Image: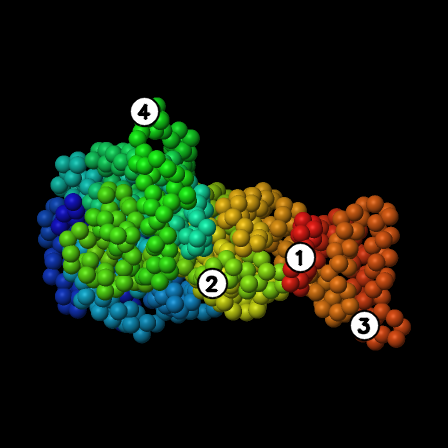
Amino acid sequence: MITERQIQLIIGCLLHDIGKVVYRSGDGRNHSKSGYDYLATEANISNKDILNCVRYHHAKYLRNASIEDDALAYIAYYADNIAAFSDRREAIDVENGFDKTKPLDSIFNILNGKHGKSHYAMRVLNSQEGINYPTTEPVKMDAHFYQTVVQNLTDNLHGITFESEYVNSLLSIMEANLSYIPSSTSNRELTDISLYDHVKITAAVASCVEQWLSEQGESDYRTKLFCNADDSYHDEMFLLYSMDISGIQNFIYTIGEKGALKGLRARSFYLEILMENIVDDLLDKLSLSRANLMYSGGGHCYMLLPNTDFVKRTLDEYDKELNEWMLQYFDTALYVATGYAVANANMLRNVPKGSYSELYREISKTISNKKMHRYNAEDIIRLNHREHQGERECSVCRRISKLQDEKCSICNALENMAGDVITHRFFTVLDHDEHGALPLPGQKHLVADSEKEVISHMQQDGYIRCYTKNGIYTGKHVTTKLWVGDYRAKDTFMELAEESVGIKRLAVLRADVDNLGTTFVSGFHGADGDEQYATLSRTATLSRQLSLFFKGYINNILQEGGESPFARKGPRNIVIVYSGGDDVFLVGAWNDVIAAFMDLKDALTRFTQGALTISGGIGLYHDKFPINVMAQEVEYLEEVSKDLDGKNAITLLSKEHCYSWPVFQNRVIEEKYVLVSGYFDSTQQYGMAFLYHLVELLRGTQEQINIARYVYLLSRMEPGKEAAKTQREDYRRFSEKMYEWSRSEEDRRELITAIYLYVYLHRSDLTQGEEEET
């Protein structure tokens, strides 16, 4: 269990740089002094250990401080150095050479070889206010903004007490207010690390250092961390730990026929909560806070942990316990693979060069090996000889269990919670079962609550924690807010299909960010191999930004869709089934899905300044088509996009219609679709059969006879002499382009795609034979 002293250290580190906000609001004193006075007088904090972490976190003040040799301030100082990468520590000891008006630079300025100059607007974090895109427009942070932030912090700090129950509320407060405030405003350095990310990592490092020192029996912090700090950077105090849940996609798509769309969303959200609760349970066992969670999303997470025998033993035990629970409730459908790499402080700041990236490679290798060898001989024997509860298969997941209405208890609970996932904001974890609750590891259970219900649960025995969806709430045990992509336009597949323009079909999109694993390992390396920016702070910042985009901002993107050839400007007729750390699964009206993917791609390009790209596949289906088959087929289309040289691609309908985004947008849509659409919309005298005849001939234009037929078909479209001059001129341009494109294989392929898209947008339905042509 986390101790009072450990809590004070976490809080002290989270607040250690609060004086920077006070200083920039107009206080002329050094930020260590102004932060100390602010917390003591305005926030009414009296704990000397917390206050000393703020007052003495710089060397020149710590050197002459009258504090004990084991004071927490020494750990805060040491952790601050590591988090800020102590190569710039000397410059920070004075306030000269800084510009208080500097905004936060974008982390994407230097990602994947970019050399951007963008920064963020002067804002607090609020997804309801829209996306804070990087901009090159001048931004100057002013004292009034910082004064507003100070007041926000004061109001929030008065609402909590500094105990273990409120540590994660404090994290939420800091994230909301400090996410777009630069940690450093030095004129000599990049200012792309937010004050929130800096204090969070400082707290994570400090917790690790405190536990490592405790196991070593070291209590002379002054000598170890201050006088001999450089030597201690070589001590292996840390573990970079990762966890990955396998089988997520298949679990999500295993649904019954009743309420299929709600069922998809319920399963997706359950896995999201499952991972978050696993993280919190593990952190509780290790006496740590969510400050030590570097990233969580898509069934994957990274944590910074202490390198102690206790931690490693606990990790091994929890790994075994977790997978035994997975087997009990899900057979072999879900599996958790874990791995860690030992690190010293120098490695976290990439000293020697390449050491930080190597940590991720080592972890990835361990996890991959575990996935290949999930179960040992003992596990397999137990699997083959275990007794099942019940004798019949669940009609949904096919697991043998006791059934009610032909479904197991989990599938029934997921079905019951499907509507609550959409309408409820609070999700409470209890240590006992309740009607309709979903199981969680460690004999815990999950229920969806209204605000009144969660308050009632908090006052009862058996309450453990609560998660909030897309909103920041502070209070007892409010562990964390979860950004959740929960946009929905309709409730059923049929309703979505009916909203389609042209043919009444669903479309399914599966997509994810290209080369993200490589980006995390080497994305901050310069073109010349320079790795000075490959650090823990930047990796954590990048992870948080992507999580915010795909879990939070995606709702804004779909709500505010741009003008498109496929849909009008405004909300998309889409439902988010799944949107994790970097990947997306959408279902909706077929034309809106294409428009939404274009929206998403353009938004990601703008958000990351072109440093990251996204590839995906889109398939069209009847609304009664089995969702698991849709998912498998579209997964293949996504793989086709990923296999294209350079990726950054979209595949529509079938593998023949795969294009890089520039080709799709500029050549297929802007060039060929616009010409076909413009001409046929203006003539109104040629039916869809005529267009299909054109496509049939285009497919076989390598044969001379088909070229002749194609030219003949185009000539039949020529207006008579009595037609207006503009009409004849339109035909001339159209026929010349159509003939020109027929001579090139790539142009023909692009033209066929454009014609199909036009036909689908203008037909109320298709015959079976016509559909098979795609």
Q: Amino acid at mark 1?
A: Leu
> 680 left or right of 711?
left
The Cα–Cα distance between marks 2 and 4, rounded to whole angstroms, is 48 Å
Q: Which mark is residue 378?
A: 4
Residue at 28 percent across and 51 percent down: it is: 437
Name the mark nearer the viewer: 1 or 2. 1
Q: Quadrant of residue 34?
A: bottom left
* Viewer-side label of 2, 3: 2
Where residue 276 appears, x then y in whole percent?
31, 49
Vertical position of residue 123 compared to residue 201: above or below: below
- Within 10 Å of the Cα at label 1, are there few (<14), some (14-19), or many (20+) other Cα atoms? some
Q: Which mark is residue 133?
A: none
Can you tell which of label 1 and label 4 is closer to the viewer?
1
* Spot occupied by residue 111 in the image (x, y as percentages of width and height): 47, 51
Q: Helix, strand, or loop for circle 4?
A: helix
- SS for tag 2? loop
Label 3 crowd bin: few (<14), some (14–19), many (20+), radius 10 Å:
some
Which label was assigned to residue 727?
3
Residue at the extreme right: 721
Residue under pointer 1? 766
